[in-house]
């Protein structure tokens, strides 16, 4: 709905998903038993059912990821899985493979994964017409591009990543993991080649960057851009992280819940997608969870500092500096007098070569004031470049972790209570903030109280005692002035609460499945390269039904052993290293001397070519599949095309 804002949180398992809901998520996304694009984040159907049952109490939703590309021999298992998760209570499927749309699926809502590479208004409109209800946009889009997509596809919900790790390549357009290891990102098994260090050389072989993580990006943080994203048309705000631990999910979900609640308070025409308000035992702070630094990426245009080139690790928050290094300890002065160190903390610093170093704290001892002594969990002589005046950061705070290990939130739905007399006893009516109504009655004699004021106060307190439920009393209206024993009031309250939960469950509505356009809408292109990720005959049939005439098989089918674009990115290494011709424009003595010539990435024995397509401002990481992958692979080439495309630089798919 256009006036509804959804906070969508990740869940590696049902327990994390339950806590995401408790901390304010309007929906969670989770992998099922298989085909979930995270090979180590699968979940049993019973856990999906348990999570859905919990989420639905607040009208929160559960989206199941079925977003890998599939082989023909996997389609029937995927079809059965779709039915199984629907029966378990899942509200939507997040899919990548268009072959699924050719199968007999349950009446479950379909969401187009970010792996479908949604960057253009034309692609978004096509997916809307094909029967998708929610589209996960490419992370690289600007506000203007999002606005154009929203205008072209007004019948779908636009979902956008607002926090977490960034893939350097357009999602669904990254093949480097498969080419180097046989582990396909499009099939849920990314080897994280983008986080490795590379040496960058120019056309003359000169080193322009040595052992830097030039494909590794900072983490996405759109916290400051939420109002602008809403104005552009985004209605679902997605947190990345189906591998993230429970503490991180609690912290980041709570942070964005607070930001969205403030926005909703300022914009009464908008509302949250689910029920209840949250209270926390901690102050949410994403900087205290794993991160590689923050960037808002391309939302406000190309930025100069989006890379985490020095390290892909979590450097932590700076807390002080070293004052002395002893034989078995070192001393610190903390910047914040109210801060404290804990046994088990982890501290980091940068060595003289610019590499991140770190060590766990074995024993932390206060020396008075802001001074602390640290006995590290390693020999001092092994701690490279730990020295006086070195700035120290903390990337694990045990006190923080312990706080988040406990119950750290409650999510409650406001309820108005009305107590009144009936002909044979008393009745309690409940109306929650969503307008759901329930009542309960009890047969009991009417007796005047000895102390009317005290009786009313006690009765009000007993009726409002909603601890252990999902409700909190917003107001209690007592019409009947009769004496009511506490046991009677408590029983009446319990019955009314049970009736209200039942009323909410009865009113819960499944998300509607969109109807595809008939006749089928034409796909924006009539020729598809390997970038379309067509890996089975059903997917080929889908595109053929939508007017595509030439279809090349997915890269994972191993039709292509020549050099191809293994990554297509909006991130540009030339720009980040100040080697872009556009940056030189207007600079006296420099303009005209900088050209967008290819660069080379070197890592061990591996060499990759960086080619720059300056018109769309994109970079291609070009290489070929390793022979070892071809030798070990069980894949059989699939030939869907009617006329095989020439071996030329790939065009994007849609």
Image (cartoon, rainbow, N blue to C red):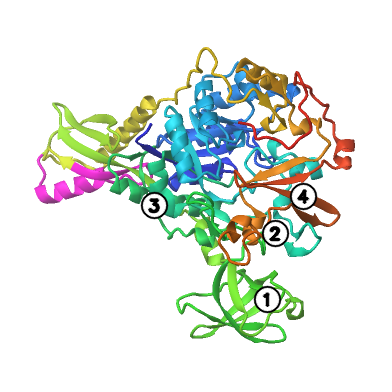
Name the one closer to the observer, 88 or 201: 201
Q: Which residues are the magenta region? A: 448-476
Q: Give me the disc on residue 213.
A: 2
Q: Nearer the viewer, mark 3 or mark 1?
A: 3
Query: Residue 111 placed where, x, y %?
Result: 53, 30
Dot 3 falls on a residue whose secondary structure is: helix
Q: Quadrant of residue 274?
A: top left
Q: Is residue 361 above or below residue 140?
A: below
Point out the image quarter for the N terminus: top left
Label 3: which residue? 258
Q: Quadrant of residue 68?
A: top right
Asked if the residue under mark 1 is in contact with the one under mark 4, i.e. CB atoms within 8 Å, the reply is no
Q: Is residue 396 left or right of residue 478?
A: right
Q: Nearer the viewer, mark 2 or mark 1?
A: 2
User: Disc 3 or 4, which lies upstream in sequence?
Assistant: 3
Label 1: which residue? 376
Q: Is residue 46 above or below residue 130?
A: below
Dot 1 falls on a residue whose secondary structure is: strand
Viewer can see residue 410: no
Q: CA distance from mark 2 to mark 4?
A: 15 Å
Q: CA distance from mark 2 to mark 1?
A: 28 Å
Q: Is residue 441 left or right of residue 478?
A: right
Please tell me which residue is depicted at 79% across the width and 64% down the height of the picture: 206
Please tell me which residue is depicted at 22% across the width and 34% down the height of the picture: 428
User: Disc 2 or 4, which lies upstream in sequence?
Assistant: 2
Please tell me which residue is depicted at 13% across the width and 34% down the height of the picture: 446
Name the one closer to the observer, 194 or 342: 194
User: Disc 3 or 1, which lies upstream in sequence?
Assistant: 3
């Amino acid at each position: 709905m256009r006036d509804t804002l959804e906070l969508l949180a990740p869940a590696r398992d049902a327990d994390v998903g339950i806590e995401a809901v408790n901390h304010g998520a309007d929906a969670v996304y989770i992998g099922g038993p298989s085909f979930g694009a995270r090979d180590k984040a699968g979940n049993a159907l019973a856990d999906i059912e348990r999570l859905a049952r919990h989420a639905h109490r607040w009208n929160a939703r559960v989206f199941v990821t079925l977003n890998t590309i599939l082989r023909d021999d996997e389609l029937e298992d995927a079809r059965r899985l779709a039915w199984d998760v629907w029966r378990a209570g899942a509200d939507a499927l997040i899919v990548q493979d268009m072959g699924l749309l050719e199968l007999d699926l349950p009446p479950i809502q379909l969401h187009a994964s970010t792996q479908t590479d949604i960057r253009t208004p034309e692609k978004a409109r096509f997916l809307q017409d094909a029967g998708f209800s929610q589209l996960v946009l490419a992370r690289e889009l600007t506000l203007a591009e999002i606005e154009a997509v929203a205008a072209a596809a007004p019948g779908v919900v636009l979902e956008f990543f607002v926090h977490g790790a960034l893939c350097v390549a357009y999602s669904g357009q990254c093949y480097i993991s498969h080419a180097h290891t046989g582990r396909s990102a499009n099939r849920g098994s990314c080897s994280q080649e983008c986080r490795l260090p590379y040496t960058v050389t120019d056309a003359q072989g000169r080193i322009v960057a040595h052992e830097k993580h030039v494909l590794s990006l900072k983490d996405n943080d759109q916290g400051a851009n939420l109002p602008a994203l809403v104005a552009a048309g985004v209605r679902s705000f997605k947190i990345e992280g189906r591998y993230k631990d429970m503490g991180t999910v609690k912290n980041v979900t709570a942070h964005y819940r607070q930001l969205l609640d403030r926005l909703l308070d300022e914009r009464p025409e908008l509302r949250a997608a689910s029920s209840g308000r949250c209270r926390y035992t901690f102050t949410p702070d994403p900087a205290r969870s794993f991160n590689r630094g923050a960037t808002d990426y391309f939302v406000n245009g190309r930025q100069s500092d989006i890379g985490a080139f020095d390290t892909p690790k979590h450097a932590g928050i700076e807390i002080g500096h070293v004052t002395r290094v002893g034989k078995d300890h070192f001393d610190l002065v903390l910047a914040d007098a109210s801060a404290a160190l804990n046994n088990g903390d982890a501290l980091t610093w940068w060595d003289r070569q610019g590499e991140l170093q770190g060590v766990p704290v074995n024993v932390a001892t206060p020396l008075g004031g802001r001074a602390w002594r640290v006995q590290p969990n390693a020999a001092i002589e092994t701690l490279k470049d730990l020295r006086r005046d070195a700035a120290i950061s903390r990337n694990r705070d045990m006190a923080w972790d312990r706080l988040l290990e406990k119950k750290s939130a409650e999510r409650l739905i406001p309820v108005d209570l009305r107590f009144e007399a009936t002909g044979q006893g008393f009745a309690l009516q409940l109306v929650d903030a969503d307008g759901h109504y329930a009542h309960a009655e009890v047969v009991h004699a009417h007796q005047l109280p000895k102390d009317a004021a005290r009786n009313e106060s006690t009765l009000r307190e007993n009726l409002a005692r909603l601890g252990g439920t999902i409700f909190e009393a917003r107001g209690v209206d007592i019409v009947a002035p009769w004496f009511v024993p506490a046991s009677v009031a408590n029983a009446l309250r319990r019955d009314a609460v049970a009736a209200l939960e039942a009323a909410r469950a009865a009113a819960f509505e499944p998300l509607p499945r969109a109807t595809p356009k008939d006749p089928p809408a034409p796909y924006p292109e009539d020729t598809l390269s390997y970038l379309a990720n067509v890996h089975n005959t059903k997917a080929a049939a889908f595109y053929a039904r939508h007017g595509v005439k030439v279809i090349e098989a997915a890269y994972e089918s191993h039709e292509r052993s020549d050099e191809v674009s293994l990554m297509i990115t909006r991130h540009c290494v030339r720009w980040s290293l100040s080697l872009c011709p556009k940056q030189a424009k207007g600079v006296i003595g420099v303009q005209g001397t900088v050209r967008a010539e290819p660069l080379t990435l070197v890592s061990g024995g591996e060499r990759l070519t960086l080619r720059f397509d300056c018109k769309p401002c994109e970079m291609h990481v070009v290489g070929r599949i390793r022979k070892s992958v071809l030798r070990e692979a069980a894949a059989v080439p699939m030939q869907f095309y009617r006329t095989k495309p020439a071996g030329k630089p790939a065009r994007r798919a849609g």
